[in-house]
Structures are given as C-alpha cells and as structure tokens.
Image (cartoon, rainbow, N blue to C red):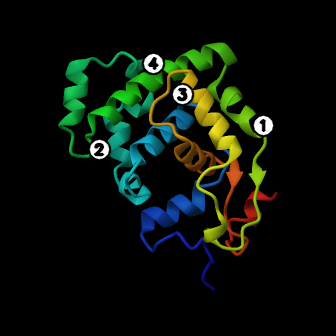
C-alpha cells in the first residue's frame, strides 16, 4: 500500500525523504535551527527543491552552519562563496548569512539558546493545524509576522513573515501536514 503524503510532495526522492523524515518534526538543536533559517532565506524567490538539492553544498560552503565560524567571514570568503556554483550565489543572500550568524549569537547569549528564543513564538509547543488540503495552508500567520518583526528588530535579514512561516513548518513549530497525510498523525503523538 502506497503512503499518502501532502500534495506538495513530488516524486523526487530528496523531496520525499525531506517530507517523510524532517518537515514538521520539532527541532530544538541550535545549529540545525540556524541551518534551516539560512536555507529558508536562500529559498526566497526560488523553489524549495532547488535549495534541498544544494543542501550538502551549503553545509560544506558555510562550515556546517557553525555561526561562530560564519560570523568571522571576510570579503575574500564572500567572494569565494559567490564563485561557488553549488549554492545560490546572490551576494545579498550570502551576506545575510553572516549578518544572521552575528544576530543569532546575540540572541543565544541573551536567551541561553536560540531554541529558547524561537520557540517562544508558539509558547514552546507545536501548533497543530487540521488542514484538509494544501490550498487551506496560509503563507504567513500572526505568529510568523511577530517572529519576523522581532528577528528584523534584532538585525536578521531575509526573514519576512512568509520565510518565517516556512521555517516554522520546517522545524515543527507548526504541523501543517494535511489530515490525509501519513505524517499528520505522527505529530499528534
């Protein structure tokens, strides 16, 4: 019997694995949260599969998303990244990763962990939605708008309400699997 998945999932094995094993699973590891924040920002204006297919390249290019290392990138490193065909070479997006690494570390210093900060936007537990079809799923919510506003105030870039909502979905802050998806009930437990 074939598993029923959310309608947005294509047959691409990378997409299927991402949907089945990652998307919507609550994430609390700071470095992984920074990775997802970076990848969601890189996706702006592009398809998610475009970024997923480059994910390993991003990990290698951006020192496995270690903000302590990234915050010290200089112009030579930025130029090296702009020549890297394995990532999206947009200078604004590349620079935003460095800016965000610095802001991320400030948040971490203030809250103890980035996790403690970011999960406050959903009161520390996932929001469980009950969508029948993908057309019902919003592109942003009051929570993602609040998150975006606060992140921007703290100096983060490429972090609008839509990117924040995609981040919330990816990191399990919201469960937006449709009710007919086999992963929906997995997140109800």
Image quarter where the C terminus lies is: bottom right
Label 2, on which residue?
Answer: 87
Which mark is in front, 1 or 4?
1
- Measure the alpha-carbon separation of dots 3 and 1: 21 Å
Q: How many marks?
A: 4
- Measure the alpha-carbon separation of dots 1 and 2: 33 Å
Left or right of 44? Residue 183 is: right
Label 3, on which residue?
Answer: 152
- Measure the alpha-carbon separation of dots 2 and 4: 20 Å
Quick check: 131 above or below 189? below
Local packing at callout 1 (Cα closer than 10 Å; few below 14, some 14-19, many 20+) is few
Label 1, on which residue?
Answer: 124
Place of residue 164 in the rendered image (x, y in percent of width and height, measured from the top left)? 57, 42
Mark 3 lies on a secondary structure that is helix
Label 4, on which residue?
Answer: 68
Which is nearer the eye, 139 or 10? 139
Place of residue 116 in the rendered image (x, y in percent of width and height, measured from the top left)? 71, 27
> Residue visible at 20% across and 30% down?
80
The first of marks 3 and 1 along the sequence is: 1
């Amino acid at each position: 019997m074939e598993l029923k998945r959310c309608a947005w999932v294509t047959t691409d094995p990378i997409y299927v694995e991402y949907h089945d094993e990652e998307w919507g699973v609550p994430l609390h590891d700071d470095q992984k949260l920074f990775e997802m924040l970076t990848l969601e920002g890189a996706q702006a204006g592009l398809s998610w599969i475009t970024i997923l297919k480059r994910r390993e390249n991003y990990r290698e290019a951006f020192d496995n998303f270690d903000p302590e290392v990234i915050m010290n990138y200089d112009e030579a490193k930025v130029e090296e990244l702009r020549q890297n065909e394995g990532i999206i070479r947009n200078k604004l997006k590349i620079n935003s990763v460095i800016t965000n690494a610095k802001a991320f570390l400030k948040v971490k210093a203030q809250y103890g962990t980035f996790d403690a900060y970011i999960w406050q936007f959903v009161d520390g537990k996932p929001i469980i939605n009950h969508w029948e079809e993908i057309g019902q799923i919003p592109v942003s919510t009051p929570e993602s708008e609040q998150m975006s506003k606060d992140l921007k105030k703290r100096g983060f870039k490429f972090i609008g309400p839509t990117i924040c909502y995609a981040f919330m979905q990816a990191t399990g802050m919201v469960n937006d699997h449709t009710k007919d998806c086999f992963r929906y009930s997995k997140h109800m437990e």
